[in-house]
Amino acid sequence: MSLPPLDTAGLTIFIVILFIGLYANIFGLPGTVLIFLDALVYALITGFSDMGWQLLVSLLVIAIFAEGLEFILGVTGAARFSVSKKVLAISVFGSIVGALILTPWLYGLGILTGIFLGGFTGALLMELVRQLHLKPALRDSNGALLGRAAGTLVKGGMTMVMVVMALMNIYS
């Protein structure tokens, strides 16, 4: 079965956007929302022939749940170890600086590594200034890092489920 060139181009763009959404989650961006919007546009263009409203509602529920769960895990991971709002702000700033510093040397991996190392370093330095003791500062900055990592992993798994659901409906 051969698709016309325009259909092939449209399907290719749809699949590329699905994987951009999957990749965006690594950086804390709302990739699940991008995947949902991609599926919605695809369904509208094809007249809901490959994707029905049931799939779109399922993708929307998963996207909302994944984004909310990532936020909750990040906040509770930090709050469980009594991390202040100031430490969270410095951690976010450290993540941005770390990504900017490591990207030229490690490219895509540098962004990911910089986000985690910069956030950890920012939280650690702020906790050291606040508490003046290394052991509690390490414990608190580890809590922020673990919460963020858990949220990213859970959201990444749910994003994979969304991609598989969308592709299975097209190719089945």
Image: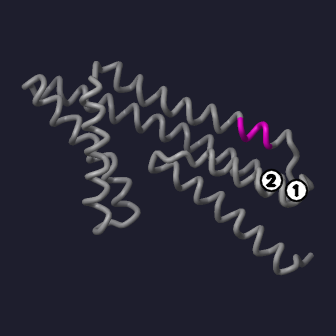
**Residue shown at 38% from the left, 26% from the top:** 77
**Residue 134 pos. (x, y %):** 11, 29
Q: Position of residue 4 (x, y in %)?
A: 87, 79
Q: Nearer the viewer, residue 171 or 66?
A: 66
Please tell me whether mark 1 sits on a helix, a strand or a loop: loop
| Quadrant of image for the N terminus | bottom right
Q: CA distance from mark 1 to mark 2?
A: 6 Å
At numbered mark 2, what does the secondary structure look like: helix, strand or loop? Answer: helix
Q: Of residues 117 and 47, which is closer to you in this image?
A: 47
Please tell me whether residue 4 belongs to the stretch shown in magenta.
Answer: no
Q: Is residue 96 left or right of residue 34?
A: left
| Residue that carries the numbered disc 2 in the rendered image | 168
Asked if disc 1 and disc 2 are in contact, CB closer than 8 Å, the reply is yes
Callout 2, which amino acid?
A: Met
For the view shown, which residue lies furthest in the bottom direction? Answer: 5
Tell me the residue at 70%/63% (across/down): 15
For the image, the number of numbered tags is: 2
Q: Residue 35: x percent and y percent?
A: 66, 51
**Which residue bears the numbered disc 1?**
172
Residue 128: give its label.
none
Position of 16 compared to 109: left or right?
A: right
Q: What segment carries the magenta color?
A: 56-60
Q: Residue at x 82, y 80 (%)?
A: 5
Above or below: residue 137 compared with residue 24: above
Q: Amino acid at mark 1?
A: Ser
Q: Quadrant of the C terminus?
A: bottom right
- How many residues crowd around disc 1 within 10 Å: few (fewer than 14), some, or many (20 or more)? few
